Amino acid sequence: MQPTILAATTAPAVAASTNAADDAVHSFGRRRRVQLVVALVIFVLAALSPLVVQNAYLRNVIVLTLMYAALSQAWNILGGYCGQISLGHALYFGVGAYATSKLYVGFNLLPWFGMLGGGLMAAALAVVLGYGCFRLKGHYFSIATIVIAEMGLLIVHNWEWLGGASGIQWPFGEDSWATLQFARDKTPYIHFAVGLLALTWFICWLIEDSRWGYWWRAVKDNPEAAESLGVTVLSSKLAAAAISAFLTAVGGGFYAAFVSYVDPDSVLQFRFSLLIVLPVVLGGIGTLWGPMLGAVILIPLTELSRSYMGGSGSGLDLMIYGGLVMAVALLKPEGLVRLWPLRQGRRKEVAP
């Protein structure tokens, strides 16, 4: 009699639990589809922006905003999901820029091959450097990335094969997608930047719900506990570093084509590392939308302040960076993306 009573009392609880699990799965799938639709709308609107924005300078700002959004999204793979705060991504940016420029100017290879080659070189470099640096923890790792990036800057400064301090000047030719040269109309650069941002965003979207994504978040929260559960911590970090470096180098190659000139100070300075990291900090580290939101706010502000303030605004962009970061740290430490209704909806879904 007792087993019958027990089964009768537990059956409704089991059914309720099953229904709740099914609802959670459907809700999760629906949220993922909504993310894709929202992203598609954003990318289409960005691609159509030249129809509304006719000013050449503002188009340049759009290109830089999209590019830094993609670079920040790439950094977020290593720094946000995996928790390894690198402050030396300017090194990978410079590798991509110099590889693309040297292969195009010196060996007459199209920039497309240069970006691919630069991305592979940066990924290999990230694995080599990460094998030693990932044994460091916390701020020691961050300091190591700064030192290595500065070493790269000094090496390129004195490397005559790469032009030394004079850099590499791209030859001017006809407007062409093959050579990524568009002197008269910057619209194609906007479309390329949209494609780069869409690629990096989609990779992050895939990572969030993948085995690697869960591994990286576990490594970020507690490496020792993750390793005890079978996660190979070092391999996970190296994979995140390689993907992040590859995408960052592709962005560097695009930047080289966009400005048609590279030198050590224009692609390897520490400020590039800051410009890559700060949008993520502002928008939200380890989130899908944070890098994009932070770049949309931060990059136009700094570019417009430099333009309209002129020489009298020297250093104003740095004050803007500092002010925004301090405000977010005090008012919304999780990042501005936490104010977004979609994020709030997600939090309500998983609430007990």
Image (cartoon, grey):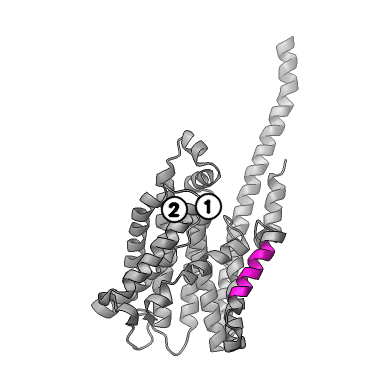
In the picture shown, does residue 131 fall above or below 309?
above
Quadrant where the N terminus sits is: top right
Q: Choose between 158 and 332: the one closer to the eye.
A: 158
Residue 245 appears at what percent x and percent y?
A: 41, 61
Residue under label 2, please give it.
240
Residue 51 appears at what percent x and percent y?
A: 58, 84
Residue under label 1, please give it.
81
Looking at the image, tell me whether mark 1 or mark 2 is earlier in sequence order: 1
**Residue name at image x 52 percent, y 36 percent:** 225
Q: Main secondary structure of the magenta part?
A: helix
Q: Choose between 242 and 135: the one closer to the eye.
A: 135
Q: Write down the quadrant of residue 268 in the picture.
A: bottom left
Query: Does residue 2 appear to the left or right of 57 in the view shown?
Result: right
Q: CA distance from mark 1 to mark 2?
A: 9 Å
In the picture shown, does residue 14 fall above or below 309?
above
Is 325 one of the magenta-colored residues?
yes
SS under mark 1:
helix
Q: Is residue 108 visible?
A: no
The kind of residue on which mark 2 rests is Ala
CB atoms of marks 1 and 2 within 8 Å:
yes
Q: Write down the quadrant of residue 126 in the picture.
A: bottom left
Write the start and end of the magenta stretch as one range: 318-328
Residue 85 appears at what percent x and percent y?
A: 50, 56
In the picture shown, does residue 72 fall above or below 229?
below
